[in-house]
Every structure is written in structure tokens, then in C-alpha cells.
């Protein structure tokens, strides 16, 4: 391709950017991706083959974390103190009486593959009922696209990344089976299935972007249980080994890494005429007939807000004033207990079993918005002895060794993720206290839990605790977003809609203000769904947007 004149410039090589690129090059277009981070080498960078593997989290590399700040999160609601995080070894995990970030707060990766590099690999379709919250339930905002329109795109994404799943998933109707059979359930998942049956709950194998058999020149999962630390054998369907690999094979995709975007130029008619970026310390600019922004629900609004200029005084694509608004985070509950008659719960696929019983927006009495429950033992890190020693087993010396022998491989965890409704106190703006090394203001996250979220969180806690009690578990740890901000799924800061006064982009991800600017990440989501992982929907929407871009070029 002629790098100086690509057909499309894509900003970001994560779930949405990678899927958009693959679709565009498959249609014969030349594409340039500008990625702020670098590349990860699965065999060299992921340390699961090392003796000290448990001490290694997902690796940090140059530019692999975007600059983000989190504003004061406010005091805890005293009516819900029963939802406080705690562990057997450390006691209460938030002693200051106010909500605080857990670790970085916003867990993400900048790089080729984006946050799919460290995601667990859940591959979920959105419940159709969650796409009409305003019309059906009087809250939130409706999607301007129907499930039936997304369904063929879901199929394409599942086929390309190799999703393994059950024969059906309730309201998420399918026109064809999953490309791969579901994974076998681990001992921990089997325990939850049994406990759930006794409580009248239906559990099933989760749909997972992890190969259950050889597929697409990639090996099947070896069930090490450490998907979030990076997959060294490439069975996990992260964007780098799926969409990016196939797109680069076409010869029509160029990726420039460590090239953060710092600006946009506008024509008099509102089109983006050029994109500015930093390459090896020097400012460069390139033009294309279309620009796709896929930097994620935090960095995408930050780039748009930083780009204020004549013709876009409040920032690009912000004629509605909605850029950065409607931020929705991950509503999380985790309970863990020790079950004396279980074994080897550290082994197996993370999040291998799931319960959708409470996923519909009207499934929880007195609350609008649902949730899902999963087998979370390995997802939250109970995969090795260090986790047990630091989180579940107390004491020192001989007593500790004895308890370790009695407890290891017996942890059972229930994870729950729920709907997060937009509220005026949850948004992303710019931290204007100082500019970063790129000369831009960094994004700042503001988040507040509404009464609906707290009620939903209590329901998630009650169901998780009931399952563990039924399974015979002795609780040793609970972690919750009641007192911690810990977001992996973030949404809504550039939502899609039909009304240009209430949304940032239309149903095809096209800016209402700039005809050649498109967004293909979770910032366009009008709602979060009842706990579904977003990557599959991001990628389905991205293929649809790419097809629309192609149609504009051929008319």
C-alpha cells in the first residue's frame, strides 16, 4: 500500500480497531493503524513457563498503559456496609470509609491486540432485551440497531476467532451453531452447577474465545487457568492472533506502533483532513478519506475533547455535548470459599461455567438491569500457592503449611457482573491540572454508584453467597465495587443513537458532526447489558461499520 495515502486510518489496534481493519482490507482497502503501544510476543513476553510464573502479572511494556487519573470517588453509602470487601488474611480492604481504586482502577492494555491480550476470553452476545432499556423499562437509552441486524456479524466474529460454546444461550438466538464445541467443565464449575441445580438455578458452559480443539492453525487450550496473564500458545482469541494476523497477511494493512495520536485537522465542511501523531519523537501527519477512532471508552473521548479547535470548540464530534458523558463501569461482585471435599480447582479454563438466569433487565425484583454469575476461581487468581497464602490462609510456619496442604486446590469462587445504568455523576473529562508528555490533557474518570447499582450489587452478593453455602464452602474473601473502582469493561462515553442532540454517533458509528469520522469501540454502547463481556459486540459492530465505510466509497 502507499503509506502516504491510505484509504482509512484507524486509531487503536484493540478489539474494535483490529476487527475494522480486517474487514476493510478484506474488501480491498488499504489501511493504516496508528497504535500508541507496541507489540507483545506471546512466547517471549508471557512468563507462564517460568518457575516464578505466579509472581508475574500481565507484563507492562513501553507505552502499554495510557495515562489516566481517577477523581475522588466519594464516601461509601452506609446502608450497604454488608457489601464491603474483605479477606481472611487482610480484613477489610477499604478502611477509609470511602470508595477507592483497586490497583490502577481502570485495567487495560495499549498495544497491538489491546485489552484482548489480557482478557479472559468470554465471548458474549448482548441480550436483545438489554438493547431497549428506555422503550421497555423507562431507563437508560435504546440502541439504534436491532439484535437481528447484529446476528450475522456475531456469527462472523465467532467463526474468525474460534468461539467454543453450548448449543444455545436462551434469548441470544442463533442462526448457526458455535464453530467449536463447549469446553469441559472444571471441578469448581461442576460444583457450582450442582449447587445451582439445588437452588433452582440453571448453569451451562460459558461461550469462550479459547479453542476447544485445533483451529485456524492454532492449538487448543491447555487449561493452565491463566488467560489474564497472556496466552503464550495463542489458543485464546485475542485480536493480535486473529483479526490482525489475517489482516496483515493481505498485504494491505500497515501498523505503526508507538505512534500516539495528538491531533486532528478539520476542513470547512467538517471532514477530518489529517491526523497528527508522534513517531520517534517527531510530529507527523497523514490523511485518509476516512478516520476510525478505536482507542477505547476512556482514551477515545479524551482524544476528541483534546481536539477542540475552530469549528469544534467543545471538541471533535461533540455538538451534542455528550462526549465523555454516560460513562458506565464494571459492576462486580466476587465471593470465594474453601470446600474441603473439592480438589484441583486451580486447574481448568477461567470463567468456564455461567448462569444467565438473572440477565434480563427485569430479572431482579425492584431493580432495572440484570446480572450474570460465573465460575471465577481462576479468573480472580486462585491458580497457585501464593494466592492461597496471601488471601485465604493465615498463620505462620508449621500452622500455615498445614493449612496450605488442607486448602490448596479447594477454593471455589463465584463472580458476578451486573448492569450499570448511566448517571450524571459518572463521566470522563480531561484532567486540566497539567498536560502530559504528548502535550495533551489526560482523561479523568468520575464514577458514582446509583441506588439501582447498589441494590443490584446486593442481589449479586446474596446469590453468590447462597451458592457457596450450598456447595459447603467456608468464606475466605469477598471483593466488590461497592468500595473499589476496578473496571475492565467500560462503556458509553460516545454513545450511538438516532438523535444528534443526545448521541455522538449514528447506528453505523459515524459521527453526527464529521461525516468521515467513525468510532468502533465500547464508547458507542448505549447500555452495558446485564453482565455480558463486550468484546464480541464491539467486534460485530466494527464489522458493520466497516461495511458501511466501504458502501460509502462505492456510491
Image: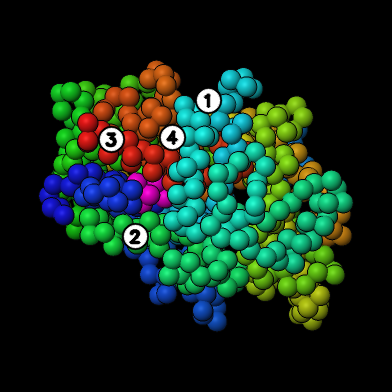
Alpha carbon separation for disc pair 4 and 1: 12 Å
Q: Earlier in the sequence, mark 1 or mark 3?
A: 1
Determine contact: label 3, label 2, CB under 8 Å. no
* Residue visible at 56% across and 40% down in the picture: 126
Snapshot quadrant of residue 317:
top left
Label 2: few (<14), some (14–19) or many (≥20) C-alpha neighbours in 10 Å: many
Of discs 3 and 4, which sits in the foreground? 3
Which residue matches tag 3?
Answer: 551
Residue holding disc 1: 142
Look at mark 2 in the image and give the residue it sits on. 246
Q: Which residues make up the magenta segment? A: 15-20
Q: Is residue 44 above or below residue 327?
A: below
Relative depth, front residue between 348 and 204 = 204
Mark 2 residue element = helix
- Residue 215 visible (yes or no): yes
Q: Of circles 4 and 1, which is in front?
A: 1
Q: What is the spatial separation of the Cα atoms under label 3 and label 4, in whole angstroms?
A: 21 Å
Nearest to N terminus: mark 3 or mark 2: 2
How many residues crowd around disc 1 within 10 Å: few (fewer than 14), some, or many (20 or more)?
A: many
Query: In terms of image quadrants, where is residue 255?
Result: bottom left
Amino acid at each position: 500500500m502507499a503509506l502516504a495515502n491510505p484509504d482509512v486510518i484507524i486509531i487503536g489496534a484493540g478489539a474494535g480497531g483490529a476487527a475494522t481493519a480486517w474487514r476493510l482490507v478484506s474488501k480491498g482497502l488499504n489501511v493504516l493503524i496508528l497504535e500508541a503501544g507496541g507489540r507483545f510476543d506471546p512466547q517471549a513476553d508471557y512468563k507462564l513457563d517460568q518457575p516464578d510464573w505466579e509472581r508475574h502479572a500481565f507484563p507492562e511494556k513501553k507505552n502499554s498503559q495510557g495515562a489516566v487519573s481517577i477523581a475522588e470517588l466519594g464516601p461509601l453509602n452506609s446502608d450497604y456496609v454488608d457489601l464491603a470487601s474483605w479477606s481472611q488474611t487482610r480484613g477489610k480492604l477499604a478502611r477509609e470509609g470511602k470508595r477507592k481504586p483497586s490497583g490502577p482502577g481502570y485495567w487495560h492494555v495499549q498495544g497491538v491486540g489491546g485489552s484482548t491480550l489480557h482478557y479472559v476470553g468470554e465471548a458474549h452476545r448482548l441480550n436483545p432485551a438489554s438493547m431497549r432499556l428506555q422503550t421497555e423499562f423507562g431507563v437508560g437509552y435504546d440502541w439504534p440497531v436491532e439484535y437481528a441486524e447484529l446476528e450475522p456479524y456475531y456469527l462472523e466474529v465467532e467463526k474468525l476467532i474460534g468461539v467454543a460454546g453450548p448449543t444455545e444461550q436462551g434469548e441470544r438466538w442463533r442462526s448457526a451453531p458455535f464453530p467449536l464445541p463447549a469446553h469441559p467443565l472444571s471441578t469448581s464449575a461442576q460444583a457450582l452447577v450442582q449447587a445451582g441445580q439445588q437452588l433452582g438455578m440453571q448453569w451451562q458452559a460459558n461461550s469462550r474465545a479459547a479453542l476447544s480443539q485445533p483451529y485456524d492453525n492454532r492449538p487448543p487450550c491447555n487449561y493452565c487457568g491463566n488467560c489474564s496473564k497472556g496466552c503464550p500458545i495463542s489458543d485464546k482469541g485475542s485480536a493480535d492472533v486473529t483479526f490482525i494476523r489475517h489482516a496483515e497477511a493481505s498485504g494491505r494493512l500497515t501498523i505503526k506502533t508507538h505512534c500516539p495520536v495528538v491531533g486532528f485537522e478539520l476542513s470547512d465542511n467538517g471532514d477530518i483532513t489529517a491526523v497528527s501523531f508522534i513517531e520517534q519523537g517527531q510530529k507527523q501527519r497523514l490523511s485518509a478519506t476516512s478516520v476510525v477512532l478505536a482507542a477505547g471508552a476512556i482514551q477515545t473521548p479524551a482524544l476528541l475533547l483534546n481536539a477542540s479547535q475552530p469549528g469544534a470548540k467543545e471538541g471533535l464530534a461533540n455538538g451534542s455535548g455528550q462526549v465523555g458523558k454516560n460513562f458506565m463501569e464494571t459492576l462486580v461482585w466476587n465471593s470465594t470459599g474453601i470446600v474441603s471435599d473439592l480438589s484441583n480447582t486451580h486447574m481448568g479454563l477461567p470463567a468456564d461455567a455461567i448462569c444467565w438466569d438473572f440477565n434480563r433487565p427485569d430479572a431482579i425484583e425492584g431493580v432495572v438491569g440484570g446480572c450474570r454469575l460465573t465460575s471465577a476461581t481462576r479468573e480472580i487468581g486462585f491458580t497457585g500457592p501464593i494466592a492461597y497464602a496471601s488471601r485465604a490462609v493465615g498463620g505462620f510456619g508449621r500452622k500455615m503449611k498445614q493449612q496450605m496442604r488442607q486448602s490448596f486446590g479447594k477454593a471455589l469462587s463465584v463472580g458476578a457482573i451486573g448492569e450499570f445504568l448511566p448517571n450524571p455523576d459518572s463521566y470522563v473529562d480531561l484532567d486540566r491540572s497539567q498536560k502530559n508528555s504528548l502535550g495533551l490533557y489526560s482523561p479523568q474518570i468520575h464514577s458514582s454508584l446509583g441506588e439501582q447499582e447498589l441494590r443490584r450489587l446486593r442481589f449479586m452478593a446474596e446469590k453468590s453467597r447462597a451458592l457457596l453455602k450450598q456447595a459447603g464452602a467456608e468464606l475466605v474473601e469477598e471483593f466488590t465495587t461497592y468500595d473499589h473502582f476496578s473496571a475492565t469493561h467500560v462503556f458509553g462515553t460516545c454513545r450511538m443513537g438516532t438523535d444528534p442532540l443526545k448521541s455522538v454517533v449514528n447506528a453505523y458509528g459515524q459521527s453526527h458532526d464529521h461525516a468521515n469520522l467513525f468510532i468502533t469501540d465500547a464508547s458507542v454502547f448505549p447500555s452495558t447489558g446485564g453482565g455480558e463481556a463486550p468484546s464480541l459486540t464491539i467486534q460485530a459492530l466494527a464489522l458493520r461499520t466497516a461495511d458501511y465505510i466501504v458502501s460509502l466509497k462505492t456510491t
